[in-house]
Image: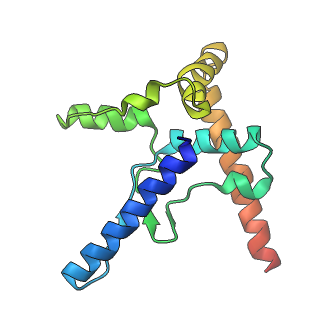
């Protein structure tokens, strides 16, 4: 199965549970996901590799279409360090090591090599893509 198929399956389950819990509790229930800054950078890079335009760079936001991403401004190492300090057991999805997926290759091979070649490259690349996406969003809002 493709990453897109797994994502659609996960979101389908989450939305189903959201509806069930909302009915059971008699009040709206939200969805919060653990996407972080590294996920956002990887998504933007994948979209660029596939030929996206400016709109594709916007990718994930803190809140969109009923989904909250409270960790979107933290990188994976910051989250791992916090979990370690708080003695929270860390579980890693074993599929994250499967190099057949472009995202995993970027995460596990290309980005570390880039960082090794030029210290601070990942942070700078992430910041640049965020600035471009934010400027585009501001320009579109100004036009409207």
Question: Quick check: 48 left or right of 116?
Answer: right
What colour scheme does the image use?
A: rainbow
Looking at the picture, how far across and down is residue 78, in whole percent?
Answer: 39, 36
Percent position of residue 113, x then y: 62, 16
Name the spot of residue 42 as percent of width and height, x first: 60, 38
Look at 52% across and 71% down and name the residue there. Answer: 65
Horizontal side of 53 relative to 5 (left or right) equals: right
Q: Count up the numbered dots.
A: 0
Q: Is residue 69 visible?
A: no
Q: How far from the left and from the top, in percent, is residue 25? A: 20, 80
Q: Is residue 121 left or right of residue 89?
A: right
* Image quadrant where residue 96 sits: top left
**Residue drawn at the location 66% of the way across and 49% of the way down:** 130
Tell me, yes or no, if residue 12 can be seen here.
yes
> Which residue shows up at 58% across the image and 34% down it?
103
- In the rendered image, which quarter contains the C terminus? bottom right
60 up-or-down from 124: above or below: below
Whether 139 is drawn above or below 79: the answer is below
Toward the bottom, the furthest residue is 26
Q: Residue at x 63, y 40 (%)?
A: 126
Q: Residue furthest front?
A: 1
Instruction: Say if 53 sits above or below 2 in the image.
Output: below
Is 32 rendered above or below residue 38?
Answer: below
Nearest to the observer: residue 66 or residue 102: 102
């Amino acid at each position: 199965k493709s990453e897109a198929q797994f994502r659609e399956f996960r979101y389908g389950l989450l939305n189903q549970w959201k509806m069930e819990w909302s009915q059971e509790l008699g009040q709206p229930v939200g969805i919060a996901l653990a996407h972080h800054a590294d996920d956002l950078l990887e998504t933007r890079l994948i979209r660029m590799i596939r030929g996206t335009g400016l709109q594709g760079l916007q990718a994930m936001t803190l809140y969109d279409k009923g989904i909250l991403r409270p960790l979107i401004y933290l990188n994976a190492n910051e989250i791992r360090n916090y979990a370690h300090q708080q003695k929270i057991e860390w579980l890693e999805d074993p599929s994250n090591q499967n190099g057949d997926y472009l995202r995993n290759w970027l995460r596990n091979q290309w980005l570390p090599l880039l960082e090794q070649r030029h210290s601070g490259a990942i942070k700078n690349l992430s910041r640049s893509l965020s600035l471009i996406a934010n400027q585009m969003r501001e320009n579109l809002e100004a036009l409207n």
